Amino acid sequence: EAMKDPTPQAHRIASFIHITQNQYDDAMAEAQRAIDLDPNDPIGYEAMAWVLIHVGRPAESLEFIERAERLDPRSGYLYRVGEAQFHQERYEEAVETMLKHSESHPDSVHRLLYLAAAYGHLGREEESRAAIDTFKKEIQANMGTGVIGTIDQVGILRFKDGGIEDLRLREGLRKVGFDASPEVVNASSEEITLKKPADGTVTRVYEVAREHCRKHGKESSIMNSTYPRYVFSCR
């Protein structure tokens, strides 16, 4: 209904929906429509920056964020600046930016994920763990659950093809002990049972099962799971 008489915000929402469906060209097109519809509305530029970060073009995204901030200096777009800096491996700057963003937007939950990962890349383990502890509390308070693993939250950010942006975040968290490998309960050429650690991820469990079965020239297939145990067959 909103797209019958679209506003820049409607195009921004459409762009976000396309990102969640891994339709990045369509997401970029919707962001451009928002800009074309009203070049003086910062929403379109922020939407384009968002897409560019997700497809691995953080340097370009900064140009759009800067335009958005010039149009609305009081916005929360500083978060996007921190994202772009992180994905350019400018970790010190990303930390400073995310901390500054936190002052005006303390409810921005995923800033903590970036903070923790940036601290991880910088070897600042204590600060990384403090950020994660706060992140977990906020996720539980907002979502009513603490079951989703810390690194599994990275998947919610929807990077294209699980590319280097996704890996950069995960690696930063792994450096301070998150996403630990699952415990092998038992294994054979026919199947493998794995136990997911508290700060591990379901994604990592599937990766380990796949690697195990491929060593035997087979593919893994989930048989059953009773959290935190997962049983895979090798076929």
Image: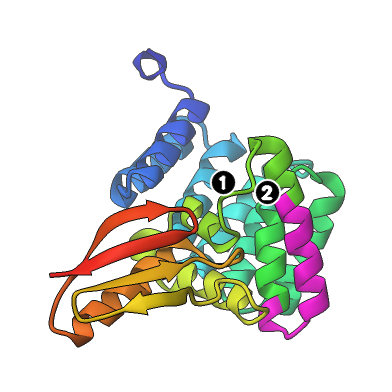
Res. 18 image quadrant: top left
Q: Is residue 173 above or below residue 227?
A: below
Residues at discs 1 and 2 in contact (Cβ within 8 Å): yes
Q: Nearer the viewer, residue 42 or 197?
A: 197
Which residues are the magenta region?
120-136
- Name the residue nearer the viewer: 61 or 194: 194
Residue 120 location (% of width, % of height) = 69, 78
Q: Quadrant of the N terminus?
A: top left
- The quarter in which the C terminus is drawn is bottom left
User: Which residue is tagged 1?
Assistant: 46
Residue wearing tag 2: 77
Q: Main secondary structure of the magenta part?
A: helix
Q: Is residue 132 magenta?
A: yes
Query: Three-letter amino acid code at disc 2?
Result: Tyr
Left or right of 10 in this view: 40: right
Secondary structure, mark 1, is: helix
